[in-house]
Image (cartoon, rainbow, N blue to C red):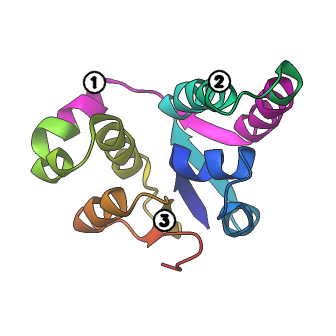
Amino acid sequence: MVCYFDSSVVLSIVLDEPLSEACQKVWEDTDQHVSSLLLEAECIVSIRHAAVSRSLDSNWMSAAQSELSDILNLFFLKPLNSDVIQLIHFRRELSRCRTLDALHLATAVLARPTLADYALVTLDLQMAHVASELSLKVIIPGRGS
């Protein structure tokens, strides 16, 4: 299966959050990992924020960034381009979620292969709802599809 991952899933794995095992299972069951280049920026900022808010040391930060780097190397990251912005103009459903989620969803729609089994993987319930409205199959780790 080809899956488009949003940052909530990757961060759950890297930050060892409560659903990290379920996220890891979906990750391992995926043949091709796709996301937006936006994923990298979101994850870097979130890891740094977690380090500060949890008063974690530089060793933790280095380990988290290393794990993120290993994960990102397995992704096919799609660029944010004018096609993504055009789809946001065209699909009003995208206004029912946050801006970064709308960018992810527009990218996921454009990245959808025509013949492959494809799903969006997220922990964000609002994003999942809008994705369903866009006719994307959705997997919510720990909850099923």
- Which residue in the protein does label 1 denote? 82
Most extreme residue toward the bottom is 144
Q: Secondary structure at mark 2?
A: helix
Which amino acid type is marked by label 1?
Answer: Ser
Circle 3/circle 2 CB separation < 8 Å: no
For the residues carrying marks 3 and 1, which lies nearer the camera in this image?
3
The span shown in magenta is 61-86
Q: CA distance from mark 3 to mark 2?
A: 33 Å
Compared to residue 117, the image places residue 78 above or below, namely above
> Is residue 66 positioned above or below 95 on the image?
above
Give me the residue at 17% from left, 51% from top. 96
Q: Quadrant of residue 126?
A: bottom left
Q: Is residue 72 left or right of residue 135?
A: right
85 is higher (above) or lower (below) than 22:
above
Q: How many marks?
A: 3
Which residue occupies 64% across, 47% down? 10
Residue occupying image coordinates x 42% and y 57%: 124
* Mark 2, residue position: 52
Provide the major secondary structure of the magenta segment.
Answer: helix
Tell me the residue at 15%/54% (across/down). Answer: 93
Q: Earlier in the sequence, mark 3 or mark 1?
A: 1
Contact, CB < 8 Å: mark 2 with mark 1? no
Gap in angstroms between the C-alphas marked 3 and 1: 23 Å
> Can you tell which of label 3 and label 2 is closer to the viewer?
2
Give the spatial CA distance, label 2 vs label 1.
35 Å
Q: Is residue 121 left or right of residue 135?
A: right
